[in-house]
Image (cartoon, rainbow, N blue to C red):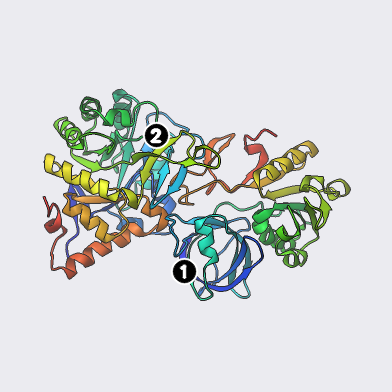
Amino acid sequence: MRKFQKNLTVSEIQFLGGKYVLLKLTDTDPLPEILPGQFVEVLTPNSQTLLRRPISINYVDRDTNQLWLLVAMIGEGTRALGRLREGDQLNLVFPLGNGFSPVQKAGEEVLLVGGGVGIAPLLEYGKYLRENGASPSFLLGGRTAADILLLDKFESIAPVYITTEDASAGEKGFVTQHSILLEKSFDRISVCGPKPMMVAIAKYAKLANIPCEVSLENMMACGLGACLCCVEKTVKGNVCVCTEGPVFDINDLTWQI
Amino acid sequence: MADIKVNIAGLQMKTPVMTASGTFGYGLEYADLVNLEDIGAIIVKGTTLNARQGNDYPRMAETPSGMLNCVGLQNKGAEYFCKHIYPEVKDIKTNVLVNVSGSSPDDYARCAELIDELDHIPAIELNISCPNVKQGGMAFGVTTSGAASVVRAVRAVYHKPIIVKLSPNVTSIADIACAVQDEGADALSCINTLMGMSIDIEKRRPRLSISTGGLSGPCVKPVAVRCVWQVARAVKIPVVGLGGISSAEDAIEFMMAGASAVQVGTANFIDPAISVKIAQGISDWLDSHGYRSVQEIVGAIL
């Protein structure tokens, strides 16, 4: 898939509470082919940081030619993204990485599990699955109700199941404790979130014999497979998360699950 | 239009701008984002005789105006390169050089011998300065005798130009440069990364898996310019300057300090097309300052 370096225009900024900001970017040309689960490397303007920041693609709106980035403002680079104004230009290298698995069979039940800002790429993936004959469901976890972002958008695509640690939304507890896992059987699971959450779901999936893939976010510089900084240990040895991933089958990783 | 062609020890380059080893993969990774033919030379990722897995993650940490890395020469080995990667890169219409590393002079020589067979690899860069491997690497580059032993072993078996990449982590880089020149090196590249370290104070542990790493990026530029200047005054062979170059002005600074050509490293991560933009910028700068050739500024302050 062809990669581009382009300036996109920040057409809308939504602060979603806490440390989260949603950037809607518009391309002057039609957006290139993008797979769900792919990411961008973005330059952070007016920041002390040097390197680009990898951010997963949250949503692609072909009608408005918009690409959405859901950003958690955690460090200097991502905080600089929160200081952008509408009309600013943002330089992206994209689309990068392999993306989530394509539809395997019509009507397959796919559970998309997300936590924190890790829910970002699941929105686009859920839309893709729905549009291509699969049957996605979302299972989203957070500490509190405020961590469940873009809920309206998720609900417009597929059923949403929620857990929060303080019971302020959905069921109390972690995603692995949600009753839907007992009530419904799924053909496969895709996960993106904090590593402990991904490991917990991977353990569950392995025990239940359900195929499972996870999206990793190792620190990286280039995003192109050149710097070899973002490696993950796999059954094939150290491989770049930016090119061989970010999505991996849990059986290809060396996690203790 | 000023003439920006350069000749480094017989290596003809369209522009004085090369891409530094370890920052540009095998070139192919960047093919969508920059016209590879417009780059003076592409120096591919450090290659060793046998495959190496490199160090554990985390391998990088961003630092003020720079970054640390401790990749540790992860590569699939010289045979894999010859068999699987060379066929992919041999038709790129520019110079593709291989950066050769090893853990003993014999290792370097056997690796260089394999690369010597490849018609479309016009030269090698000998890496005696990698700070991220336990054996070999920088260990050779920090003494005159160690540096000389590697160059001697490779010179005996390798028939094309040898560029030796020097470490700044030494007391006198000019002494190392002279020792390497005496063993038959055709050119030098200065500098490899500076050994550094960064600690996550909240986690009370180093940010890199092996604690230390190599520092690169704009923060090292003044050190690199100084090294190029010291080396260029000490040797007769050409010097290729690198270390934090991210603009045409940076490149010109290195050339005035004595570099006949430059390499761009960390800046490739920020702008994949930077090497070509810098070459254009050098040309424009020469035009606007009334120079007809890039040669007129090389060593201008020596």
Residue A17 picture location, percent across and down: 66, 64
Q: Which mark is residue B132?
A: 2
Q: Amino acid at mark 2?
A: Asn
Nearer the observer: mark 1 or 2; the answer is 2
Q: Residue at x 35, y 26 (%)?
A: B103
Front-lying residue, A89 or B159: A89
Which element carries disc 2, helix, strand or loop? loop
Which of the chains bears the disc numbered 1?
A: A
In the image, residue A132 sits, relative to residue B186, either above or below, namely below
Q: Position of residue A77 (x, y in %)?
A: 50, 58
Label 1 environment density (alpha carbons within 10 Å; few <14, some 14–19, many ≥20): some
> Which one is in front, A106 or A116?
A116
Q: Chain of mark 2?
A: B
Write down the residue under mark 1. A7
SS label for mark 1:
strand
Percent across and percent down for residue B227 are: 22, 43
Residue B297: x %, y % from top left: 14, 57
Near mark 2 (Cα within 10 A), the count class, few <14, some 14-19 or many ≥20, is many
Task: Look at label 1 and name its amino acid.
Answer: Asn
Looking at the image, the residue that sits furthest to the right is: A183
